Image (cartoon, rainbow, N blue to C red):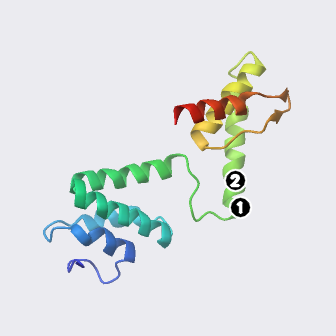
């Protein structure tokens, strides 16, 4: 079912997400503001998931899912459409953040362990095994904890 109220310029993802809409609800405006920020292939996957949740759990849960996706992808993540310059800039900002945070610790060894945990859990990046301070066991501990928790 294609919603008749959708604008003529609605994307494929918007049409997928609208499959279960009631005619008196104009959620497409809400969804458009979120879906337009992602490449088509990714937006289509999000829209399919949205439609499935809408069908099984209702409109409220589907809209909450979309807000969760928006929050998760916009708070710490790099844009999916980022170019090389954007990636380098993002990496430099994260490195500067780590440099500033390391001064919060009196013990450099503890700083390395803590920053490795932050980088792994916040940015999903496995830190290097060696730092300027020498070998670190932090990446192995992170993997062990991560695998046992999952």
Q: Residue at x 71, y 61 (%)?
A: 85
- Give percent across and percent down for residue 73: 49, 52
44 sits to left or right of 82: left
Q: Residue at x 53, y 32 (%)?
A: 149
- Give percent across and percent down for residue 103: 72, 24
Q: Which residue is mark 2?
A: 89
Q: Residue at x 56, y 50 (%)?
A: 77
Crowding at label 1, few (<14), some or many (≥20) Cα neighbours within 10 Å?
Answer: few
Q: Secondary structure at mark 2?
A: helix
> Measured along the vertical axis of the image, is residue 44 above or below residue 131?
below
Query: Splitting the image into 4 quarters, where does residue 81 fall?
Result: bottom right
Query: Splitting the image into 4 quarters, where does residue 5 fall?
Result: bottom left
Q: Which residue is mark 1?
A: 85
Q: CA distance from mark 1 to mark 2?
A: 6 Å
36 sits to left or right of 54: right
| Disc 1 and disc 2 in contact, CB within 8 angstroms | yes
Query: Splitting the image into 4 quarters, where does residue 147 fall?
Result: top right
> Measured along the vertical axis of the image, is residue 73 above or below residue 148?
below
50 sits to left or right of 117: left
- Give percent across and percent down for residue 92: 72, 47
Instruction: Please give the label number shown on residue 51.
Output: none
């Amino acid at each position: 079912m294609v919603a008749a109220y959708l604008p003529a310029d609605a994307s494929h993802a918007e049409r997928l997400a609208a499959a279960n809409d009631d005619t008196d609800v104009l959620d497409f405006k809400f969804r458009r503001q979120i879906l337009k920020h992602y490449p088509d292939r990714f937006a289509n996957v999000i829209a399919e998931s949205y439609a499935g949740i809408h069908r099984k759990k209702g409109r409220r849960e589907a809209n909450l899912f979309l807000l969760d996706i928006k929050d998760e992808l916009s708070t710490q993540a790099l844009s999916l459409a980022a170019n090389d310059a954007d990636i380098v800039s993002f990496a430099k900002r994260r490195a500067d953040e780590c440099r500033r945070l390391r001064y919060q610790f009196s013990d450099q060894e503890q700083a390395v362990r803590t920053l490795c945990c932050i980088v792994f859990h916040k940015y999903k990046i496995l830190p290097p095994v060696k730092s300027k301070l020498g070998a670190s066991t932090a990446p192995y501990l992170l993997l062990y904890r991560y695998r046992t928790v999952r």
